[in-house]
Image (cartoon, rainbow, N blue to C red):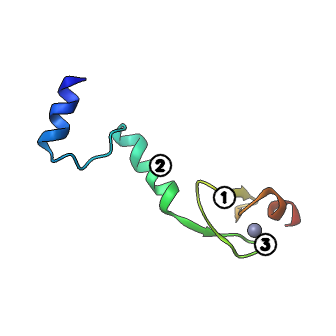
Amino acid sequence: MLALVLLYRMIGGKLPSFPKNFSSKNRELEETLVECATCGTYVTLQESLQHNEKHYCSKECASKA
Ligand SMILES: [Zn+2]
């Protein structure tokens, strides 16, 4: 754990504190916006629901499709 802290400081403390492979995938989900196929609202991939290869902002919109 101490080694991780030292490494973190050596590279300037710019990396997030969670594991790298987790963070890059998670960031992609958080930052990628998709349009709801029913109402046109933009939501992040993380928040969206996928149904029939389309994205929806909520279960309500997905059920209207
Ligand atoms: Zn919607």
CB atoms of marks 3 and 1 within 8 Å: no
Amino acid under disc 1:
Ser
Using the image, determine if residue 11 lies above or below residue 49: above
Secondary structure type for disc 2: helix
Q: Is residue 55 left or right of residue 22?
A: right
Q: Which tag, 3 or 1, sits closer to the chain's start?
A: 3
Specify few, some or many for label 3: CA neighbours under 10 Å numbering under 14, 14-19, or 20 or more. Answer: some
Secondary structure type for disc 3: loop
- Residue furthest right in the image: 64
User: Residue sitting at 71 percent across and 76 percent down?
Assistant: 40
User: Residue sitting at 71 percent across and 63 percent down?
Assistant: 57
Q: Which tag, 2 or 1, sits closer to the chain's start?
A: 2
Using the image, determine if residue 6 lies above or below residue 62: above
Q: Position of residue 1 (x, y in %)?
A: 25, 23
Reading the image, the residue beneath label 1 is 48
* Quarter of the view holding residue 42: bottom right
Specify few, some or many for label 1: CA neighbours under 10 Å numbering under 14, 14-19, or 20 or more. Answer: many
Q: Is residue 18 left or right of residue 60?
A: left
Amino acid under disc 2:
Asn
Q: CA distance from mark 3 to mark 2?
A: 25 Å
Choose between 51 and 8: the one closer to the eye: 8
Specify few, some or many for label 2: CA neighbours under 10 Å numbering under 14, 14-19, or 20 or more. Answer: few
Q: CA distance from mark 3 to mark 1?
A: 12 Å
Reading the image, the residue beneath label 3 is 38
- Is the residue marked 3 within 8 Å of ligand 1, measured from its CB? yes
Q: Position of residue 3 (x, y in %)?
A: 18, 26
Q: CA distance from mark 2 to mark 1?
A: 14 Å
